[in-house]
Image (cartoon, rainbow, N blue to C red):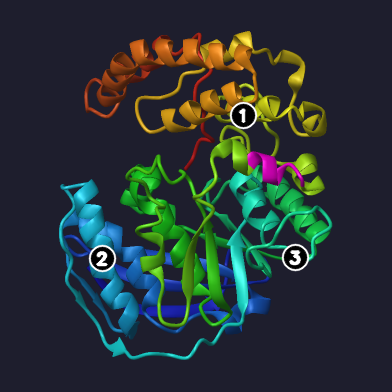
Amino acid sequence: MRLIDTATQASPETLNSTRLTGRIYWGAGEVFDLWVDVPEAYSANVSSSGNPWLLAMLPWAASLGEDIELNLPVDALLLENVQGILAQWRVWYPALQGVQVTCPVQGYQEVAGTRTAAFFSGGVDSYFTIARRLPGNPYGIAAVGRVDDLLTVWGFDVGVYDEQEFSPLADMLQKSAQALGLNHLIIRTNLRQISVYKSNWGPLTFGCGLAFIGHILGKRFSEVALGSSYPYGSLTAWGSHPLVDPLFSSSALRIVHDGAAYTRIGKTAVAAQLPMARASLHVCQAEGLRNCSHCEKCYRTMVAIDILGCKDGFEAVFDWSGYTIKKAQKIYMGEGIEQIFYHEMIEDAQRCQRVDVAQALGIAAKRSSRLARWVSLATWMSRQPGIWRLGVAARQWLLKSSISAQYISGI
């Protein structure tokens, strides 16, 4: 796999943006043009190194068993860290292969950027990270750092060509950032059109994808915070992880795994203190702008808010008219690591003396366990040529009476 060249030009698709394109040769002479659109006002902050391109190519090359060759210099510390990333990935996923990197090596560089960034999707993790990085905030939240810029990526949670879904969400996030007094950048990329980023986003590639965006603006930032997914004590193989995320750092840009000391309920309690979160929290993976209030991700968040006793504060973002604790018995908790959040919630419900919630989630857990092996089989069938339609139909039938995960099409 080889980065042949890079080019910079006015974006042909995103208004008032500069497009940075890297042409990558892979496989048997195939070509992929990986591009990133950055607002023109920040074009001077775009990295000229090979750092972002190496990170973008890394899980792709490891999944294909290809080595990487770049004609741009890569930071010596990042190059060293890559070996640690690969070592940990191969422990989790033995099918991945080692990767040799050939490139010019750049020695230690003084930090060029001065700003700190955090990714902003409008979800609990986003608002939690922001809430803890507002020194002198009026909400009584002790700050553990700072944040200057919020980064929203078009092409990660919403398809890179799905303007109808993305534009309203972007407008809402922009208003929230303004209310918080923070700078907001929208970055657009086709990274998720690469096969491994499309098929293995959660378990493997999304931390790498976020770090890729951070390094693209490497001349602007000294630190980029990635909101944690799972808490210490419940850690598992995942695309963003406290063992791996710091290894995405270079000598000039620090990547931080933020907030793993908190459970999901703990994060929600902190985020709920921000008026902007109560007015515009967006967790739904089935809708680009509104929370549908009936998919698994929405219902999980609504249950957490209920446990905390602050449903009234989130009337603007969820439709509570169809919400009941009894309905939570129908949540399908998935076939694996998704259950971690629910085990935490059961413990927190018991601690908050919400016996009704704990019992409902306990029933859902038992029901999910009975369904899981069959749903897993149907999912496997849906990926096999010739029988995939049968697998899709079987999965839909199995989950027809469940509150299950739903996703925006086109990702």
Q: What element carries label 3?
A: loop
The span shown in magenta is: 268-273
> In this rendering, does residue 282 appear at all?
no
In the image, is residue 100 above or below residue 137? below
The numbered mark, 1 or 2, whose residue comes first in the sequence reads: 2
Disc 1 to disc 3, how far (Cα)? Answer: 26 Å
In the image, is residue 72 above or below residue 337? below
- The residue shown at (71%, 41%) is 281
- The residue shown at (36%, 15%) is 369
- Amino acid type indicated by mark 2: Gly
Neighbours of disc 1 within 10 Å: few (<14), some (14-19), many (20+): many
Disc 1 to disc 2, how far (Cα)? Answer: 36 Å
The numbered mark at residue 139 is: none
User: In the picture provided, is 139 more to the left or to the right than 133?
Assistant: right
Q: Position of residue 163 (x, y in %)?
A: 63, 48
The numbered mark at residue 84 is: 2
Q: Where is residue 257 in the image (x, y as percent from the top left)?
A: 48, 59
Mark 1, mark 2: which one is toward the viewer?
2
Placement of the N terminus among the 4 image quadrants? bottom left
